[in-house]
Amino acid sequence: MTDAGGSNTRHTSPVALVLIDVINHFDFPDGDRILKQALPMAAHLARLKQRCRRAGIPAIYVNDNFGQWRSDARSLIARCLDSGCAGQPFVEQLRPDEEDYLVLKPMHSAFFQTPLEILLQYLGATSLILTGLATNSCVVCTAHDANMRNFSLYVPPDCAAARSRREHLLAMEHIQQMTDAKVTPSSKLRLDALRRAGRGHKKGMA
Amino acid sequence: MTDAGGSNTRHTSPVALVLIDVINHFDFPDGDRILKQALPMAAHLARLKQRCRRAGIPAIYVNDNFGQWRSDARSLIARCLDSGCAGQPFVEQLRPDEEDYLVLKPMHSAFFQTPLEILLQYLGATSLILTGLATNSCVVCTAHDANMRNFSLYVPPDCAAARSRREHLLAMEHIQQMTDAKVTPSSKLRLDALRRAGRGHKKGMA
Amino acid sequence: MTDAGGSNTRHTSPVALVLIDVINHFDFPDGDRILKQALPMAAHLARLKQRCRRAGIPAIYVNDNFGQWRSDARSLIARCLDSGCAGQPFVEQLRPDEEDYLVLKPMHSAFFQTPLEILLQYLGATSLILTGLATNSCVVCTAHDANMRNFSLYVPPDCAAARSRREHLLAMEHIQQMTDAKVTPSSKLRLDALRRAGRGHKKGMA
Amino acid sequence: MTDAGGSNTRHTSPVALVLIDVINHFDFPDGDRILKQALPMAAHLARLKQRCRRAGIPAIYVNDNFGQWRSDARSLIARCLDSGCAGQPFVEQLRPDEEDYLVLKPMHSAFFQTPLEILLQYLGATSLILTGLATNSCVVCTAHDANMRNFSLYVPPDCAAARSRREHLLAMEHIQQMTDAKVTPSSKLRLDALRRAGRGHKKGMA
């Protein structure tokens, strides 16, 4: 493997920001319900991403391929930014740029049949800030898979959404209890401290 | 998951053609040696791909991401088709089109941390025609991984290449003996029969 | 692979009963709370297992190895059946016999770094009846992983337990909504019909 | 996960000895040919294992389950040590004891659907000494999988065997070239130095 950085610098960092399914047309059953819950959180997540950039924390988009098996993220982004797309007001706040990483996933978990794990290894990341859609589906699956792979987790509740407030809150409670995640609002995350140290791998495993 | 076909038809087929690392700039150690061995086989593989298209057998490119974690296959193809790229004479004969599938891989095996397995499940493919580069590296790793996942294998020796003729022949012998592959020149593959029946999964497993 | 049946007959079946972490000493934080919730369900699960046996549905125990990396399930069972073990009254109702399968797992999901998937392929099982401990931990992780691998799921709520009734019920609701599982009391499962047909793989995937 | 050591001490070590399929009845096609090649190497491997023990390097047996899905390694060992078993003269020199780890595998690679990776993480091992049977089958598959997972490899050629001397030598050449393994006779391995430092993960990955 060669260098992975857009600017030819390798983004070694003990922590990475993961954005799940935010490049989204919301054109699926209950998509309108999720969009309604998601719109208010877009600004929070956009701000967190900016702060991560300044702190040197890389952003990794992990996104459904929506059945298009052509590894063509650019077309997917273009479709979601089209003015006729329901997701446009959400996606325009969160579009990836040249420095961001982007991995396509075929199913719910960001780890299942994707190169996310090896990308994290490449970056040296042992802690993840998990964000995106939907809290009780892809986010919870990814949190479990990250936990089984020994990553330390931060899941800011203002940077995720589900079909309803109740589903979101129950999923956050589940994630906190069952994946040992720190549940802290994004504005309270101390990114510089994370960037310096991470939490390291959990459980005293090597 | 929604429909995966470029023309909105789903390519259900018991057999799939897999092309490994043929979108290639050959700009790595020993790349010139592999290119020299690979150039004569490009026409064979291009012809096989055409015959597969006519027989309704889908083609799946599984390709190194060359350290660019942006799921941007289009840029990768463009780079390899540039007139200044050593690989241009090879790649121009084998460029994917709208109907082909394309999966990026981070390491040697086409199955390791990629969605290939779920794509094959989606297509209904239980047999694979394995081709590409290099016979004794990514092709042999993929053949072992396909064998452990119970796929039936066809590996036409005129559609793969390595750094030297000797390495190619030894790897083909190894693949034939150790992964239970049928080693048959591409011109002898009876694609219509394969398309109708596949060989089915091996070993009497369900 | 050779025959896997204790009686040298291969248990081909479109459906399998999966029992998660029921061989258990309950000697861990909150173990006493889980045991209290689990004890009343042991009889239900024991009865379901008997009915599965009569219907020709194989039972697969997937169990934590409790940090003993020696593939020695027999010692683990013996320890849990010891009269001094808190789990004894629970485990004695559910002990595996010669015809059952047993797979050790290192983490929460029954699929993560275990041979469960290949065993299910060997048995020809495309539907799973998921049972065991704890509903909101290993059961929910396994349900998500089974769903991503396209298995049809049945999760009888009277054959699983968690630390509290609330956690159990919320987890069952989550499983039903998010993994497309049928949530049916064990006494209502029509095993003969399942044994004949399974539900087949989901989602129209091949 | 709790402590994994037989003597309740955790065997943290940057390097581990892996013994593939040495608990073997050799009762399969070509088993007699492999046994003939394997017998002369048993003493070498037994000596290497003793030296590893003294140097504090843990030994991990990764073994075919021979279609018995019961995680009952003890019965498997007993069968192979029976005086009527062809493999007895081989296995008696290499039987595992209380301090060794033992993982069952369902297919060729020691990593495929097994907990080996998480056990190595637990031990802190980033380098592997690969040994066992057969060089051109399970050993080569495991070497490729270890390489893709970024482990540093040592493969002593006097501690592996195949159906013929030619197959063994070609497979060793392949392993050396394609998995970046150090191919050094077991007597030349400087275990104390390895034990202190390992080679670390490869390729500058974190």
Image (cartoon, coloured by chain):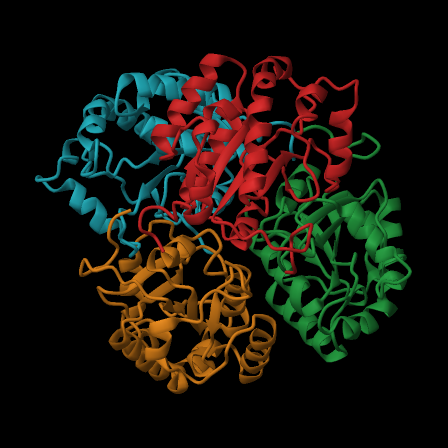
Chain colours: A green, B red, C orange, D cyan
Q: Is residue D160 left or right of residue C36?
A: left
Instruction: Name the quadrant containing residue C42.
Output: bottom left
Comparing A158 with B43, the one in front is B43
Residue D54 lies, with reference to residue C127, above or below; the image says above
Q: Is residue C97 visible?
A: yes
Q: Residue at x 61, y 15 (%)?
A: B30
Residue D180 lies, with reference to residue B69, above or below; the image says above
Comparing B128 with C184, the one in front is B128
Q: Is residue D149 visible?
A: no
Disc tally is 0
Comparing A63 with B182, the one in front is B182
Place of residue A47 in the rendered image (x, y in percent of width and height, measured from the top left): 89, 57
Quarter of the N terminus of chain B within the rendering: bottom right
Residue C151 lies, with reference to residue B7, above or below; the image says below
Place of residue B39 in the rendered image (x, y in percent of width and height, measured from the top left): 61, 17
Comparing D111 with A23, the one in front is A23
Residue, far left? D84
Q: Residue at x 57, y 41 (%)?
A: B54
Instruction: Name the quadrant containing residue A46.
Output: bottom right
Place of residue A99 in the rendered image (x, y in percent of width and height, measured from the top left): 83, 40
Q: Is residue D19 left or right of residue C99?
A: right
Q: Is residue D11 left or right of residue B106?
A: left
Quarter of the C terminus of chain B within the rendering: bottom left
Q: Residue at x 12, y 42 (%)?
A: D82
Residue C144 lies, with reference to residue B5, above or below; the image says below
